[in-house]
Image: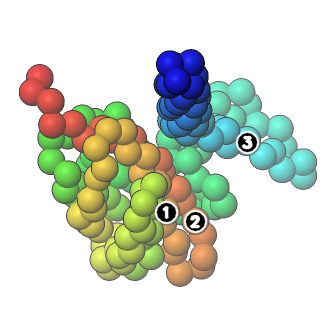
Amino acid sequence: MFKEITLAITLGALLGFGLTGGYLASQKSKRTASQPAPTPVINETSPAPTSSSLETKINEDIKTNNTSNPDSTLIISSPKNEDIVANSLLEIIGTASPNSQIIINTSLKHFQTTASDKGEFKMEIDLESGLNNIQIDAFDAADNQSTVNVQVTYSTAKI
C-alpha cells in the first residue's frame, strides 16, 4: 500500500511539473516572437537612389511600419512604445489620412473607429495585465494600409 501511494504521488508530481513547464515554455515563446522588419523594395526602372536618400526612405518605412503605400501616414502620439501604465483603460491618440478607418488589435479584442476630416482619432481600449502588443492599422479611401505596432505594459505594482 505504501508503494502505491508513493508511486501515485511521484507520477502526479512528474505530470504536474511537465504540464506546468510546457505551459510556461509556450507562454514565453508567445512573448518573445517578433515580426520581421519590412523589406525595402527598389523599383528597377527608377534611377538608383543615393545611399542617403535610400537610408532616409528605409528609416521612414520602419518608423511608420508602412506595408503598402509610402504616401499614407499613421502616427501614434499616445501611448509611446514600451510605456508602462497603471490603468487598465488606455486611450490611443493619433493621426492618419482624413476619414481613414482605424482598426486596433490586441491579443484578445479588436476595436474600430474612424479618423476625423483632419485625420485625428482617439479610442479607449482595455489592457490585459502585463505586456500588451497593440497593432494599429489605418485604411484610407484608396485602400492604402499603414500599420504601427506599440507595446504597452499594464502594471499595478508601485514603483
| Residue 77 in sight in this render | no
Q: In this view, does 146 lie above or below 65?
A: below
Residue 71, given in percent of the width and then of the height, sits at 57, 60
Q: Which residue in the rendered view is the most extreme toward the left?
A: 158
106 or 8: which is nearer to us?
Answer: 8
Residue type of the residue flagged with mark 1? Asp
Q: Residue at x 38, y 70 (%)?
A: 111
Earlier residue among tags 1 and 3: 3
User: Residue type at mark 3?
Assistant: Pro
**Is 47 positioned to the left or the right of 103 in the image?**
right
- Disc 2/disc 1 C-alpha distance (Å): 7 Å
Task: State the mark number for residue 137.
Answer: 1
| Earlier-in-chain disc, 2 versus 3 | 3
Which residue is tagged 3? Answer: 40
| 145 vs 79: above or below | below
Circle 3 — which element? loop
Q: Name the residue under label 2.
A: 145
For the residue pair 16 and 141, the one nearer the viewer reads as 16
Q: Do the residues labelled 2 and 1 touch (CB within 8 Å)?
A: yes
Q: What is the CA distance from the residue labelled 2 to the residue labelled 3?
A: 16 Å
Quarter of the image where the C terminus is located: top left
| Residue 99, percent from left and from top | 40, 79
Question: In the image, is residue 52 above or below residue 104?
Answer: above
Q: Nearer the viewer, mark 2 or mark 1?
A: 1
* x and y percentages locating residue 135 in the rendered image: 47, 54
